[in-house]
Amino acid sequence: MLRLYGSVKSRTIRVLWMAGELGLTYDQKDWLPRAPETRTPEYRALNPNGRVPTIDDDGFILSESMAINFYLAKKHKSPLFPADPKHEALVLQWSLWETDRLDRQIVNHARHFKDLPEAERKPDLAKAAWNEIVPAFDVLEAALTKSQWLAGPAFSVADLNVAAALYRALSLDLGKWQHLNAWLHRCWERPAAKKVRAMREGK
Ligand SMILES: N[C@@H](CCC(=O)N[C@@H](CS)C(=O)NCC(=O)O)C(=O)O
């Protein structure tokens, strides 16, 4: 049995999206980041970082949302994990790139721009994050001007990982990045994506 640890209101959304694409059944421990359940010795034994997501796939324990998605797609022989080694390498390239260039920046921007109570927001931090986001969006825009998808001719785990990480960008004005905007909405129009979005937004 596959067990997923983590709430849809966390990076677990990426794994829930992948599970939906693959049609997997799973048991979810719907725990928010820093929930008391993530601070127990039992959970630390599964993920010493105390973070979500983590999976337990019949005793195989894995953390890191991007790695979990590579594993699930590959294990289930999904076309979302490309067979061509060049496309596979591009999947890794874009997923690692996102983790470096956008993952924390997009969260920091959203928190200090609008998510935190006003008194806790630090406009300087929102601005610093935005200053890193803009050149990264320019890079994505350039790539998506040349190709509809990030790693080969079809939607893949690269698109899923990057688009899922850009959930918060769905509410940004992306008018300056038209190809990025179209690609992001193309990804989030997929039935598995719409389902996790509805879960997250309580619809
Ligand atoms: N690189 C990790 C990041 C995991 C992560 O930071 N998860 C957050 C929630 S989105 C968390 O559990 N934070 C709790 C904490 O910082 O203690 C991944 O992609 O899985």
Image (tube, grey):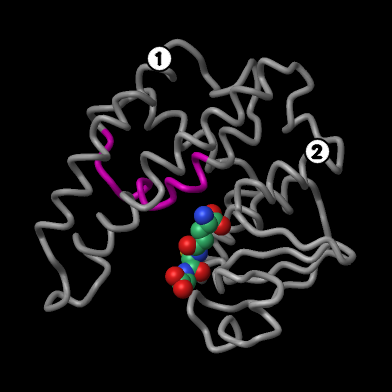
- Looking at the rendered structure, the secondary structure element under dot 1 is helix
68 is higher (above) or lower (below) than 113: above
Image location (x, y in percent) of residue 55: 73, 63
Question: Which mark is drawn over residue 34?
Answer: none
Residue shown at 66% from the left, 47% from the top: 67
Image location (x, y in percent) of residue 81: 74, 31
Task: Name the side, left or right, on which 131 lies relative to 25.
Answer: left
Q: Which residues are magenta?
A: 162-174
166 is higher (above) or lower (below) than 96: below
The quarter of the rendered structure image containing the N terminus is bottom right
The disc labelled 2 sits on which kind of residue?
Lys
The disc labelled 1 sits on which kind of residue?
Thr
Residue at the disc numbered 1:
145
140 is higher (above) or lower (below) than 48: above
Between disc 1 and disc 2, the foreground one is: 2
Q: CA distance from mark 1 to mark 2?
A: 28 Å
Task: Name the side, left or right, on which 112 lies relative to 193.
Answer: left
Image location (x, y in percent) of residue 76: 86, 42
Number of residues whose C-alpha sits closer than 10 Å to that of mark 1, classed few (under 14), some (14–19) or many (20 or more): some
Whether residue 168 appears in magenta in the rendering, the answer is yes
118 is higher (above) or lower (below) than 139: below
Please tell me which of labels 1 and 2 falls first in the chain: 2
Residue shown at 57% from the left, 71% from the top: 7
Residue at the disc numbered 2:
74
Q: Quadrant of residue 13?
A: bottom right
Asked whether 174 or 32 is in front, the reply is 32
